[in-house]
Image (cartoon, rainbow, N blue to C red):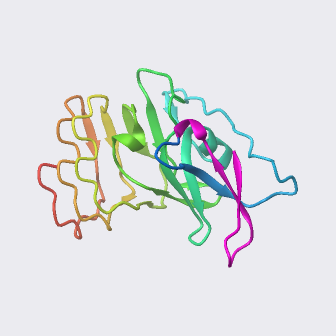
Amino acid sequence: IPIPYKPSDKAPVRIVMNPSTACAGLLINKIIKPTSKPNRIAKTEEVKPDAEGWLKTSTIEEVESLWNYRINEETNTVVLESLKENNVKSDDIKIEIPRTVDGHNVALSNLNTATFQNATHIRIAEGEEQVKLLATDIHHGFLNNKNLKHVELKGLDVSGVTDMTMLFSGCDNLQVINLLDWDIQNDTITTSM
């Protein structure tokens, strides 16, 4: 449902929302600048798993298909909010977080079960760019998540996080975890992580 919105000091934008995932307010999928066709919504490309079963996104169209997201024009960043509900149908859901999307840096709004829903495998794509984690408190993020089996988050910038208490506590099926290069010097609480 396109809703016109005009900030006072910026060019007009359209807010595009997914009504099926809205609850207790409006969940913004993304903000896009108007095109020559005011009612045009970006074409969505279905993301298909690669040969190893990983769902990868590198274009805005692919991100549109898999993620609820927004674009922060000031920082040139695509902010991944959460996986779209019921978009991935598999018993083994492997999600790869991109480091860049169409020339934009990538940030992750949060690191928790709500962000990744039923994902069994989560990793960050190969590359040099860091993926910024915007949340500062990720305690209990995956608490008692029975789906999670494999987590490789090398390249995730967690320098702003202050609480990781029990982040993976109770993840009984978690077999692989790689958090190499995490800068946790600002993290004041890592109890039972």
Residue ID at (46%, 37%)? 95
Residue ID at (71%, 62%)? 13
Q: Is 64 contained in the magenta span?
A: no
Relative to 99, residue 75 above or below:
below
Q: Is 2 contained in the magenta span?
A: yes
**Where does the image place residue 121, in percent across and percent down from the top left?**
38, 34
Q: In which quarter of the view is residue 189 placed?
A: bottom left
Q: Is residue 41 left or right of residue 24?
A: right
**Where does the image place residue 142, in percent across and percent down from the top left?**
27, 41
Residue found at the very far bottom of the displayed protein: 9
Residue found at the very far top of the displayed protein: 91
Residue ID at (52%, 35%)? 55
**Where does the image place residue 17, in percent across and percent down from the top left?**
62, 47
Relative to 109, residue 48 above or below:
above
Depth check: give the residue in front, 62 or 178.
Answer: 62
Residue ID at (48%, 60%)? 128
Q: Is residue 45 left or right of residue 123?
A: right
Relative to 13, residue 27 above or below:
above
Magenta region: which residues?
1-21
Count of numbered marks: 0
Q: Is residue 167 left or right of residue 94?
A: left
Depth check: give the residue in front, 44 or 28.
Answer: 28
Relative to 118, residue 37 above or below:
below
Q: Quadrant of the N terminus?
A: top right
**Where does the image place residue 3, in percent across and percent down from the top left?**
70, 53
Q: In which quarter of the view is residue 8 placed?
A: bottom right
